[in-house]
Image (cartoon, rainbow, N blue to C red):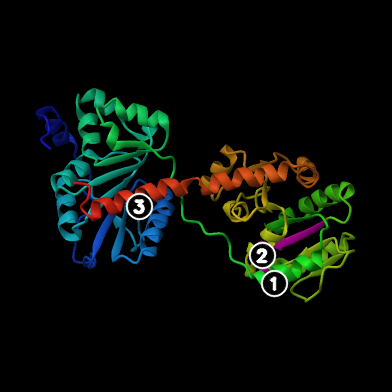
């Protein structure tokens, strides 16, 4: 693709600090096909892992090479950002196809890839992430950038419409939504689930996952509130730290609650109000047994477990006002009305009560299923495109 003199002049003025140069420490190119995935940041890596998993399922000899603008992790390469670095990168890795995961469109890198005649797919393309002002400063720049891509998968209809204004042909542009991000439902033992389910019976129950010590009193107060309306409600409580387990049991009993401790091989009885389980066995079993899961940490430091873990196995997600981890998953569920947020400790108990007593939990679970599985179709489309170009049927 020949660039206009104006675009060529613009690129000549861009002098970033060079990164992504191939050196003696760079690993050798593996055998088989290489797919170079360019990620704007680490939030895109989950989608890359999902793509890799789908390709590996087919048993093909394919290596997915992921690059980031910066990383100290030896598992990832640094995305080159100059002509020379990009030429060296392509010369070393010889990618069969490049998948550009949204973010900023680096003109120098993209045009250099295009010169090598390596097909480039732009996926999760979101108009808000593009520097469209550069296109106004340099006429034709955005049109040339978008024409460099063999196919474009837009994140939403609005982005697709804006991209189409730059002359992208209809058969090269489609709206797919976000890719799936590769999370698997948390593991569990089915025989154990069936056995404990018989023990617990049909009594109302909810699960508080990874509860830090400083949230224990709030969780207890919420449980007492909910139990006043839902007779025989059982709280399954998993501490964040295994070392806190005995202290939690002691404090609960001192507070007048009837407690069974799994670590001590105590079985929950009809009179048991709280069943304390250890974090070392994971939360998959308990999310499947309890129709409601509270994400510990959301009342304090915001270090919550992944909300997709309960959401993918049919447990309604309850979360407080502080979320500092797994933000992408939290935001996706929140946008889809697939979790129940509460804003203060005072509203914690009523939130548990509402989920136990109404059809709200079932609706949240239905919405969560849609939100967590939505990306599968987009990933299917991307996998099909990758194979189309690897097999040479795109030409």
Q: Is residue 323 visible?
A: no
* Quarter placement of the N terminus: top left
Tell me the SS state at disc 2.
Answer: helix
Q: Residue furthest front?
A: 393
Mark 2 or mark 3: whose residue is earlier in sequence: 2
Q: Is residue 174 magenta?
A: no
* 93 lies left or right of 244: left
Q: Is residue 240 magenta?
A: yes
Provide the residue designation for mark 2.
285
Mark 2 or mark 1: whose residue is earlier in sequence: 1
Mark 3 or mark 1: whose residue is earlier in sequence: 1
Q: Residues within 10 Å of mark 2 (few under 14, many from 20)?
A: many
Q: Is residue 249 above or below residue 6?
A: below
Residue 217: image x %, image y %?
A: 79, 53
Tell me the SS state at disc 1.
Answer: helix
Q: State how far apart marks 2 and 1 are (Cα).
A: 8 Å
The secondary structure making up most of the magenta span is strand
Range drawn in magenta: 234-242
Query: Which residue is at 58% across, 43% downward?
Result: 333
Query: Which residue is at 74% across, 71% downward?
Result: 195
Provide the residue designation for mark 3.
383
Residue 221: image x %, image y %?
A: 82, 50
Provide the residue designation for mark 1.
192
- Whether tag 2 and tag 1 are in contact, CB under 8 A, the answer is yes
State which mark lies toward you, 3 or 1: 3
Tell me the SS state at disc 3.
Answer: helix
Q: Is residue 369 visible?
A: yes
């Amino acid at each position: 693709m020949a660039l206009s003199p104006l675009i060529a002049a613009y690129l000549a003025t861009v002098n970033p600090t060079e990164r992504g140069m191939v050196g003696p420490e760079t690993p050798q190119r593996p055998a088989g096909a290489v797919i170079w995935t360019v990620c704007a940041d680490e939030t895109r890596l989950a989608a890359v892992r999902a793509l890799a998993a789908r390709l590996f399922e087919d048993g093909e000899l394919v290596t997915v090479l992921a690059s980031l603008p910066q990383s100290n992790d030896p598992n990832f390469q640094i995305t080159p950002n100059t002509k020379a670095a990009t030429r060296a990168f392509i010369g070393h890795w010889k990618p069969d196809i490049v998948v550009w995961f949204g973010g900023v469109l680096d003109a120098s890198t993209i045009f250099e890839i295009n010169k090598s005649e390596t097909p480039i797919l732009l996926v999760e393309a979101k108009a808000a992430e593009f520097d469209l002002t550069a296109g106004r400063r340099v006429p034709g720049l955005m049109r040339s950038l978008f024409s460099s891509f063999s196919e474009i998968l837009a994140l939403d209809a609005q982005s697709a419409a804006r991209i189409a204004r730059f002359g992208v042909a209809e058969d090269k542009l489609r709206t797919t939504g976000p890719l799936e991000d590769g999370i698997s439902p948390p593991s569990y033992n089915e025989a154990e689930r069936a056995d404990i389910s018989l023990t617990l019976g049909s009594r109302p129950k909810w699960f508080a996952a990874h509860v830090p010590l400083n949230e224990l009193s709030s969780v207890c107060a919420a449980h007492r509130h909910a139990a006043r309306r839902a007779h025989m409600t059982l709280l399954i409580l998993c501490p964040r730290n295994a070392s806190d387990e005995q202290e939690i049991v002691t404090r609960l009993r001192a507070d007048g609650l009837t407690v069974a401790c799994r670590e001590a091989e105590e079985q929950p009885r009809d009179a048991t109000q709280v069943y304390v389980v250890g974090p070392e066995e994971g939360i998959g079993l308990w999310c499947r047994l309890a129709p409601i899961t509270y994400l510990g940490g959301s009342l304090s430091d915001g270090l919550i477990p992944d909300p997709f873990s309960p959401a993918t196995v049919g447990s309604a997600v309850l979360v407080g006002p502080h979320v500092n981890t797994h933000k992408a998953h939290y935001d996706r569920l929140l946008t889809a009305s697939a979790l129940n947020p509460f804003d203060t400790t005072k509203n914690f108990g009523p939130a548990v009560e509402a989920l136990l007593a109404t059809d709200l939990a079932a609706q949240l679970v239905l919405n969560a299923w849609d939100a967590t599985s939505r990306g599968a179709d987009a990933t299917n489309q991307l996998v099909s495109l990758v194979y189309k170009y690897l097999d040479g049927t795109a030409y």
